[in-house]
Image (tube, rainbow, N blue to C red):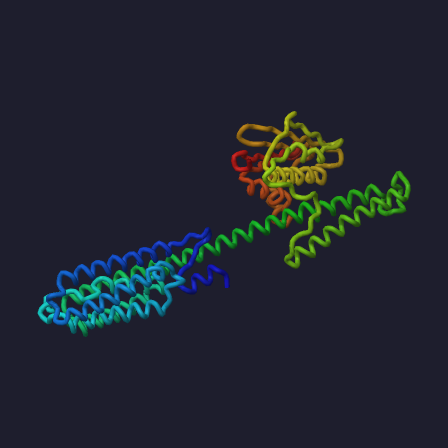
Amino acid sequence: MTDGGRAGAVGGTVAAGGMSVELPLWRAISYFRVLALIYALLRYVNSYLHFLHPVAGWIFLGALTLWTLATVRAFANPQRCTWYVLGVDLTLAVTGIVMSGLTDAPARISHGAPTLPTIWAAGTVLGCAAKGGWRPAAAAGSVIGVANILGHGGPTGDNIHNIVLLMVAGCAIGYVIELARASEATLTRALQVEAATRERERLSRDIHDGVLQVLALVQRRGAELGGGPGGDTGGSGTGGGASFAELGRLAGEQERALRTLMTGGPIPAQRLPEPDAAEPRDLTALLRPYADERITLSAPGTPVLLSAPAAGELAAAVGAAVDNVRRHAGAEARAWILVEDEPEAVTVSIRDDGPGYAPGRLGEAERAGRLGVSQSIRGRLLDLGGTAELYSAPGEGVEVELRVPRKANQ
């Protein structure tokens, strides 16, 4: 069971982020018990001379004082306030009510004199409400109500009025606590689902950027090599063998990555070591490897600095867009990468002169499980707090505009 589950089992759930609506309520109950104790002591100081047995009242209030001070921390924390503590608290409240009927003068009782614990007994009902909801609160309120009727004045108007108020307050707070716990549990589940979804999207990006691109590389290299080591490579057999060895190595890395992914372990490093996240990276330097005879890179003459994670993710998104150009735009298509360094954001545009695509094609590709655009491009920019816009029409090529705000990725 998780920590959140343990907390909920003992009467105190903690929402995501370490916040809980219950903890302030528990502290308020703890403060209430102390203030109610002071009130009970002041009432008794003003009226103990009218009691038949005032010493007994002082003995009870002394015990009540020691118990209240000893349980201040317990009532301020749902883990410490166990059902045993609440049981002792309820016993003490009932004892004080019954003793009030035995130590006070009958005339005072008939005129509505308060019990020895007075409103302190309400703290027990509130504690049961916070611990277990409205049902334990109703049970504790019923026990205190019966004690008032049988031990202190009978079913008088004042007794019935006080019992109704106590039951309403306890049940209302208990019901609110139950709703709060249900809401926090729902929020926790929603956050867990969101975290799992984001992790699946991240894994989809890794698979797309790794496995699918390696398979595309295998297809292109295979065509270049003429389908085998013995084909016409335009060079010696050794060169062809080396190319096949490289493809085998890359395929082996991807196989190990997938096996590790399927068994739940960390994906082994296949790229350069991750840079220190505290050090900014030059985005232009990360984009230069994508430039070749078909793809032109235009960037400012000065470094375009972003935080290392933001620069890496943006460069990976550009790489996914470039890979789409190479695979879908045609063998003769050209592409241009333009980097714009603005005070508020960094914008990278990737434009090609390929055939473009018809409206709705991206949605069809996503439904078919081809997630290059939705995950490797849009997903990355969404994680960075940025945007990814795609523009295309049949015969007009494709333009991808990636924009990352600086404020969120400095």
Quarter of the picture containing the C terminus is top right
Residue nearest the observer in this picture, 220 or 330: 220
Residue nearest the observer in this picture, 210 or 394: 210
In the figure, is residue 61 to the left or right of 291? left
The answer to whether any part of residue 234 appears in the image is yes
Image coordinates for residue 106, horizontal then vertical, percent: 10, 71
Image coordinates for residue 234, horizontal then vertical, percent: 88, 38
Q: Is residue 10 above or below residue 369?
A: below
In the figure, is residue 342 to the left or right of 295? left
Quadrant for residue 274, please give it. Answer: top right
Residue nearest the observer in this picture, 262 or 406: 406
Quadrant for residue 403, please give it. Answer: top right
Image coordinates for residue 213, horizontal then vertical, percent: 71, 45
Quadrant for residue 58, please give it. Answer: bottom left
Q: Is residue 111 above or below residue 291?
A: below
The answer to whether any part of residue 167 appears in the image is no
Q: Residue at x 74, y 45 (%)?
A: 216
Image coordinates for residue 265, horizontal then vertical, percent: 65, 56
Q: Is residue 160 above or below residue 210?
A: below
